[in-house]
Image: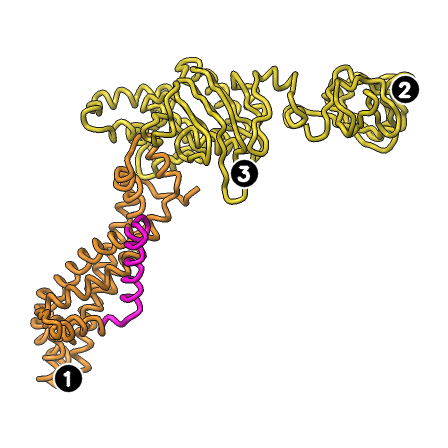
Chain colours: A orange, B yellow
Amino acid sequence: MPHWLDLMLQSLGPLLWAGLVFTVPLTLLAFALGLGLGFLTALARLYGPRPLAALARFYVWIIRGTPLLVQLFVIFYGLPSLGILLDAFPAALIGFTINVGAYTSEIVRAVIAAIPKGQWEASFSIGMSWSQAMRRTVLPQASRIAVPPLSNSFISLVKDTSLAAAITVPELFQAAQRVVATTYEPLIIYVEAALIYLALSSVLSALQNRLEAALARSAGALEPAA
Amino acid sequence: MKIDVSHVTKQFGSFAALAGVDLEIKSGELVALLGPSGSGKTTLLRIIAGLEWPDEGQVFFDGTDALARSVRERHVGFVFQHYALFRHLTVFENVAFGLRVKPRRRRPDEAKIRAKVHELLDLVQLRPLAERHPNQLSGGQRQRIALARALAIEPSVLLLDEPFGALDAKVRKELRRWLRHLHESINVTSVFVTHDQEEALEVADRVVVMDKGRIEQVGTPEEVYERPATSFVHDFIGESVVIPVSVADGALHFGGGRLALDSQGVHTGDARLFVRPADIHVGPPDDAPLKGTVKRVHGIGSARRLEIDLVPAYSIEIDASGTGATPGDLIGLTPNRYRVFAVGA
């Protein structure tokens, strides 16, 4: 067995374990929470009273305008100065959630705005309230157009979680760094880590395709708005 | 349900969509709002529906203030120009939706919903398509589903915004007749917007002719066609030959000469003479009030038309099925029926 393969197989266990225990949960949780935050932010911007809409815009502006790594450092290393001490994992989860929230709010805002006004009016005219129209007419249609851009965010997030290594979360990439520290084989081990990320995002891409196909089957493809 | 619209105005920026509109629609009537684009007809319909709010004025449904209620509380069925069917639902669910979203205590049970939807799909003759999605239907089918959806909530008023506007000519004609029959069978007060005079005259009990945010005339199809109240109505409905004239000393003048025609009480000043092309008699030039030279003849048989240069220079086109005039002939023209309107009236 060639040396590189041997090395990869030996380190596969720790890397996969770190991925399973930290990277995957961090990704799933941060995305779910971030999407919720993004939805609320989008609603605030679209329909909120002026101060709330301004606050939402400010939030998106700050988060999109600063590096994710810096945001994580502020939360993990900066907040203790204010007496807020967080463990590495919760700090990372908060950082990623806030980050995902800002980006997905823009997606949610765009897809809700893309639903033609006539769909709202048709809903009202058959007796729906605003929230009924939102839940039963607009969101089902909007969520379908949202699948590709949200999948993009999700796949980006999987890879971005490697930044959590910098705030001491023992996730996949940090596990790789630790292996490198003992084996002095950075090329092999980092390529191996890259391949695991690639596998994870490939699985997500495949899921995205199946989800899109299922949505198209379940309710007919949406045609362009008239 | 009786609808009363009173002194309604609506401004979009600097554009006056409605400049003071009064209208009374009787219970069970089928009324057409007819006018060119920008005449305010759609705005008026949307204000009646509650999709738009007037700047001033009032709307009453059976004497109660409709403006105090939102669109969902007004109980109107609205049919949109581009259908606005729910694209994520089947035909069946589109029609059922208005019943399913009712508050629980007023919501019919599943069996009643199914029965009602099937009844409506039978009414619009589309029951076999119940499980399709809107994007699998033709334009005419979509519009009928939109109508079934609007009727599902048993509205007290049915409002239709250019319902057949996006359909081809043949389907339009079919649906027109079908809407007429539907209205006779369900007899709900209905208002539809159209820019197609043929549609309005064929389908409606009464026609409301609108221009520039105002109502020009309200009347039966016969009234607006036979007795147009304003020059706009005469021009807009049916074909008109229009000749610029002037009124002086109680008589009509054209091209410097006095015409042997009645000025119909129009005051001194510039005016226009309106005649339906079919109401012009072509004869020898001798005593005819208007004279002209045949410039061109086109069409044959009943579609024969003459292009005539009046003396002095003014060009008109008339029906000429019964004449043997050929290009170059000097002929006399006698309007059997005509209307004179002052410019601006």
**Do pointers 1 and 2 mark residues of a single chain?**
no
Q: Which of the pair A225/B10 is nearer the observer?
A: B10
Please say whether residue B57 is one of the residues in the magenta stretch: no
Please say whether residue A62 is one of the residues in the magenta stretch: yes
Q: Which chain carries label 3?
A: B
Disc ID at residue B285: 2
Q: Mark 1 lies on which chain?
A: A
Q: Earlier in the sequence, mark 3 or mark 2?
A: 3
Disc ID at residue A185: 1
For discs 1 and 3, the disc positioned in front in the rendered view: 3
For discs 1 and 2, the disc positioned in front in the rendered view: 2
Question: What range of the chain is rendered magenta?
Answer: A44-69
The answer to whether residue B167 is visible is no
Disc ID at residue B16: 3
Give the amino acid type for the residue marked by disc 3 in the picture. Ala
Identify the residue at image location x=82%, y=28%: B308
Disc 2 secondary structure class: loop
Give the amino acid type for the residue marked by disc 1 in the picture. Glu
Q: Which of the pair A7/B105 is nearer the observer?
A: B105
Q: Which of the pair B63/B225 is nearer the observer?
A: B63
